[in-house]
Image (cartoon, rainbow, N blue to C red):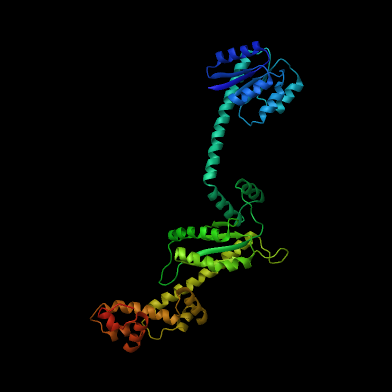
Amino acid sequence: MWKVLIADDEPKIRRGIRSVLERLDPEIEVVAEAGDGEAALALAESTLPDILFIDIRMPFLNGLELIERLSAYRRDWLIIIVSGHDEFDYARKAVSLQVFEYILKPVNEDELFRTLEHAKRELALRRETNRYINWARETIREHREVLQQQFILDWLSSSLSKTEIEDCSKFLGLTLPEYATILAIRLEDKVLTVGSLQKGYRTILTYSVKPIIEERLGKNTLCVIDRDDTVIALCTEDGAALQNAIPAIEAAIEETTHQHPLIVLVPRGQAGSRELRTVQEAYEEALSELTKKGSYQTFVLLAQGYIEKNYQYPDLSLEETAAELEISPGYLSRLMKQATGYSFVEYVGRIRIQHALQLLADPAVKVYEIAEKVGYRSQHYFSRAFKQILGISPVEYRKGGSPQ
């Protein structure tokens, strides 16, 4: 049903319009009639009609004044003026008030029918449009965070025009900094054995890093995860303040994910200095630095692979392994210590003992033979290294002793 209000100071006109409307269309329900503008305003507020037929010449509030007051309610009702005055000024004012139609008295039944059908089609279209708009608003509300994340990533990658940035940031309720300090975090697993995190598992762990950063750096920090599972935080603080927070952030990430994070900080620089970078420039620099840090892990993995293939040779050394990787021994030594927690010699010793444990399971293999197979020149050196790492001798272990 479509609800109708009729406002006219002549009762005969009101009855006539009502009679014609109810006869022409069974979907029409006249919910109110008013003889003056003030009464019409009150009835419109209480009945919320879909269509209002309003005369111009009425007491207290004339038709145009009434329409101005009704426009403040921002309703989807349609207003049709029914007037006996064919004057240009009235028509012009009606157009400025966005009146739907202007009908002259005496009302022609065919014209009223056409106007009514037109009004119903317009109302149906508006309602459908409003349903879509409400659905879109609800969808945007539910997925606002995802939309914000994607927009920020597109902005960081310089793939948006200035107009798109202004429109989207306003639409999504974001204030984007022109300059910001970038904190970039990417997870790298602790390299204790050959192998690394699978892509899907790394992504899951990365999503547990984001709330850590947001909690540590505050709500004003924009924090997103890019396509390479890198957490990017845009901070308005200077680099020195954030640098002091990095140890605590690193510890919290390791405690939560049991993985070692690679962290890069790119300061925003000082206003007026040559070092001042745009956010996009800082983002590119951060990714470049992370890539370099990630390559360190590659050297460690290559070194581990080389050790795994050559641990049985007693002469295996740091210098030999570094030469194979074409890096300096000192650099490789630092990388091994940082990644595994052990020096090169300690790590090789542990690999040899791991293989020795497998051989000790076979009672037919003599201890001195095991020593030779895993890279020791004598059973004496083997036994000393074994006890240093596990706390018991190879003979005690074979007899069922437990490592200390």
What x and y, as percent, mark residue 401?
Answer: 28, 79
* Figure quadrant of residue 4: top right
Question: In the image, 95: left or right of 332?
Answer: right
116 to 209, vertically: above or below: above
Which one is nearer the viewer's eye here, 376 or 262?
Answer: 262
**Name of the residue lying farthest toward the top:** 12
Can residue 240 be seen here? yes
What x and y, as percent, mark residue 353?
Answer: 35, 79
- Residue depicted at x 44% and y 66%: 258
- Residue depicted at x 72% and y 28%: 96
122 to 204, vertically: above or below: above
Which one is nearer the viewer's eye here, 352 or 398?
Answer: 398
What x and y, as percent, mark residue 58?
Answer: 71, 18
43 to 158, vertically: above or below: above
Can residue 228 be seen here? no
Question: In the image, 342: left or right of 387?
Answer: right
